[in-house]
Amino acid sequence: MSVPGIQAEELKKRLDAGENLFLLDVRDENEFEISNIGGHLIPLPELLERVDELDASQEIIALCKMGTRSARAVQLLNKAGFTHVRSLTGGIHAWSDRVDPTIRKY
């Protein structure tokens, strides 16, 4: 099952324009400490028990290292009733490759 995605360049453009996007980082805490782009950290295994930290009316962009866990997060949130959720295609590695090379890859 494919999930709605957003390319790193489009996300950067929308963030620069000041759009009210919620960046949901679903990686583990140690990964977040290595590199992050300022998202709200909720590791994927904790997502459903912490879903009350999210606003269903806001557009949520889920991200992880390469895009696999964030795609799973989109599926889980869709099942929980969230409709405005997309996955950062290629994850933080795509962000590092195409938007900000100072973001460390691991």
Image (cartoon, helix red, strand yellow):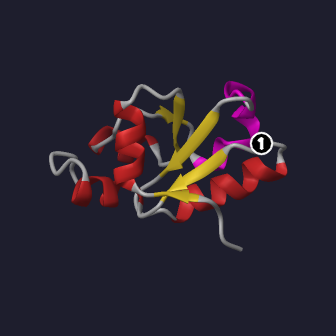
Is 32 part of what is drawn in magenta?
no
How many numbered circles does the render carry?
1
Work out which residue is located at the far left of the displayed protein and give it: 102
Q: Badge 1, how many Cα within 10 Å: few under 14, some, many 20+?
A: some
In the picture, residue 59 is in which quadrant? Answer: top right
- Name the residue: 40% across, 57% down: 65
- Name the residue: 21% across, 50% down: 104
Q: Is residue 106 visible?
A: no
Across and down, in percent, residue 40 comes to 50, 31
Across and down, in percent, residue 16 comes to 34, 32
- Name the residue: 67% across, 26% down: 53
Location of the N terminus (image quadrant): bottom right
- Residue at image mark 1: 82
| Relative vertical location of residue 32 with respect to residue 16 in this rendering, above or below | below
Location of the C terminus (image quadrant): bottom left
| Relative vertical location of residue 74 with respect to residue 80 in this rendering, above or below | below
Is 45 part of what is drawn in magenta?
yes
Q: Is residue 37 visible?
A: yes
Across and down, in percent, residue 26 comes to 53, 46
| Relative vertical location of residue 69 with respect to residue 49 in this rendering, above or below | below
Across and down, in percent, residue 6 comes to 49, 55
Mark 1 element type: loop
Left or right: 61 as drawn, with respect to 106: right
| Relative vertical location of residue 24 with respect to residue 93 in this rendering, above or below | above
Which SS type dominates the magenta stretch?
Answer: helix
Left or right: 82 as drawn, with respect to 59: right
Give the residues in magenta.
Answer: 44-55
Which residue is more in the foreground, 60 or 10? 10
- Name the residue: 60% across, 51% down: 86
Left or right: 36 as drawn, with respect to 67: left
For badge 1, the amino acid type reads Phe
